[in-house]
Image (cartoon, helix red, strand yellow):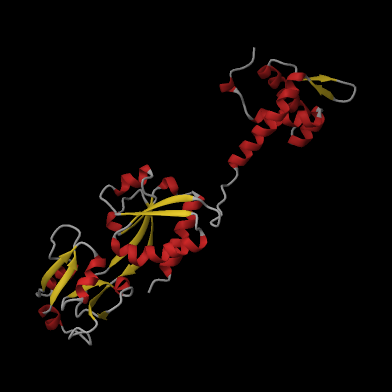
Amino acid sequence: MPADIRTFDFNLLKALDALLDERSVTGAASRLSLTQPAVSGILTRLREHFDDPLFVRAQRGMVPTPRAATLAGPVKQLLAEVESMLQPQGFDPATASMTLTIAAIDYALRVVMVPLLSAIRRQAPGIRIVVTPAEASLHAQLERGDIDLALITPASATPDLHTRVLFEEDFVCVLRADHPDAAGPLSLDRFCALEHALVSYSGSPFAGVTDKALAAIGRERHVALSVASFLILQDFLRVSDLIAVVPRKLAATTQGLAILEPPLAIPGFTKIAAWHARSEHDPAHHWVRELLFKTSNTLI
């Protein structure tokens, strides 16, 4: 009786393929770098598995039985498919077709995603990008594959995620180009006297890292406007006398605003890329990450 497929050693198929091509135990042994007794033992196992002699002796070598002859094509096809499956997966950006989901806040959209998307469109036009907000359930989204890549700060990353630093960021002051104080420099007293705008996603809407830095030296400012987007903040600044403290790389992308150094030390932050182990070795994802690292290195 033939053996159960669950006990079948698929390495035997390589030997069967060699025997079918060589029609000789000696020839198959040479091709497989095995001894003749070893190949004879394999042939015995093959006969048991297929419940058929498979080969019979002839004047010159061996002749396959009808059963063996019907196996020749399928065996070669199966071996080719297995070999292809085991080969390292290639990736050609020019012909790639896939959808990638990236989580980022609006700051990262302007600073990181714009140059990244421009590079992807030039080099891999078949890649579609979905940009979504970074949420509290970020880790679960990465684990499920709902998100492929996240642009976040280290505090938002869990220890089991793969991460890489994109850049270090600090802060500058921005105000409209024709603001009375646009020529600078700003003194600490003048900085505190001006009305401020800030971005707050949650928590205390009228306090941020700047207020903590001021409190540490016994000073405070008046925040007149709190918004949830860096991008809309710029529009408010252009039509008012408000001043804002924003990330330097974001300020560098704006137009119609003057940039001044703050009159006190304000702690900056680190921007990182994070991804799950499930996509660590995927060639397409690896290519996109490397492109991200390259474009991030060019940021001012």
Q: Is residue 290 left or right of residue 17?
A: left
Q: Residue at x 33, y 73 (%)?
A: 253
Q: Provide residue 189's location: percent of width, then percent of height.
A: 11, 82
Q: Residue furthest top?
A: 1
Q: Provide residue 290's location: percent of width, then percent of height.
A: 47, 60
* Location of residue 224 (image quadrant): bottom left
Q: Residue at x 17, y 57 (%)?
A: 202
Q: Residue at x 69, y 33 (%)?
A: 76
Q: Provide residue 237's location: percent of width, then percent of height.
A: 20, 74
Q: Residue at x 55, y 52 (%)?
A: 91
Picture quarter with the N terminus = top right
* Location of residue 248 (image quadrant): bottom left
* Foreground residue among 14 and 29: 14
Q: How many marks?
A: 0
Q: Is residue 101 above or below residue 144?
A: below
Q: Is residue 72 left or right of residue 86?
A: right
Picture quarter with the C terminus = bottom left
Whether residue 299 can be seen here: yes
Q: Residue furthest front?
A: 239
Q: Is residue 93 above or below residue 45?
A: below
Q: Is residue 149 left or right of residue 82?
A: left
Q: Provide residue 280's location: percent of width, then percent of height.
A: 45, 50
